[in-house]
Image (cartoon, grey):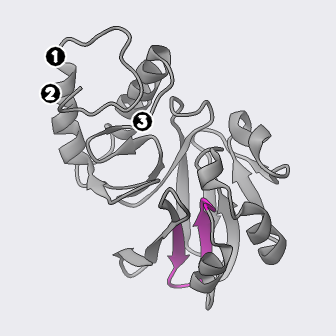
Amino acid sequence: MALVAKNDRIQIDRLELGPFETNSYIITCRLAGESVVIDAPAEAAKILGQLKGTEPRYILITHNHPDHLGALSELKSKLRIPVAVHPLDAKNLPSPPEILLGDGDTVSFGNVSLRVLHTPGHTPGSLCFLTDKYLISGDTIFPGGPGKTRSPADLRQIIESITDKIFVLPDDTQIYPGHGDSTVLKREKAEFAIFSSRPHDPNLCGDVLWLSS
């Protein structure tokens, strides 16, 4: 577990879980003691342990890949709180979600509000969650590049999601991805500018890096 952000209103903790070292984030309202879980990769006991002392309100899912869902059934049965996901990614969950989220929606708990950004490309229903200068980005954007894509059309779509929804945020926005360490938006914009200034194979997709693809 790592404390990745803390101010007078919120605290964000990251747990790296399961064989793919997938990140689960717990955002806690420090004033009200309420919390949300973002993604449920594996090792439900560790997530439950980190939630102790808080009042969990929601389980939010960034996208429906199995490495982000392994602990979802156990968490849902033990916490008895709603699961929220984009409708395009709802079908692969182990059970139907209680809440369907769309672009621009708000998830509120305690004195904290998360803005929902629909950022398709990695999956059709990929979501990011924004509060203050903190963005939980799922597998949409990582340090150095976008999330993995399966086709050139998907790469074009994820780049459009990133440029239209994420690069319009303030440069000091902290990005917390679905795997690995955080990054800052200003750095990603600078590296993307280099990527976009170069010609690319029209069939480019898969694992793309801004500086070397």
Residue 45's quadrant in the figure? Answer: bottom right
Measured Cα–Cα span from mark 2 to mark 3: 19 Å
Task: Work out whether 179 lies above or below 157.
Answer: below
Q: Split into 4 quadrants, where in the image is the C terminus?
A: top left
Question: What residue is drawn where x is 68% and y is 41%?
Answer: 86
| Element type where label 2 sits in the image | helix
Residue 190's quadrant in the figure? Answer: top left
Q: Is residue 153 visible?
A: yes
Front residue of 186/148: it is 148
Name the kind of residue labelled 1 in the image.
Answer: Arg
Q: Earlier in the sequence, mark 2 or mark 3?
A: 3
Q: Residues within 10 Å of mark 2 (few under 14, many from 20)?
A: few
- Label 1 close to label 2 by CB (< 8 Å): yes
Please state the horizontal and vertical placement of residue 79, each as a whole percent of the image. Answer: 77, 76
Disc assigned to residue 165: 3
Task: Work out whether 38 lies above or below 13.
Answer: above
Please state the horizontal and vertical placement of residue 90, each as a whole percent of the image. Answer: 75, 41
- Which portion, as a residue range, is magenta? 25-41
Name the kind of residue labelled 2 in the image.
Answer: Ile
Q: Residues within 10 Å of mark 1 (few under 14, many from 20)?
A: few
Front residue of 142/86: it is 142
Can you identify the residue that label 2 sits on?
194
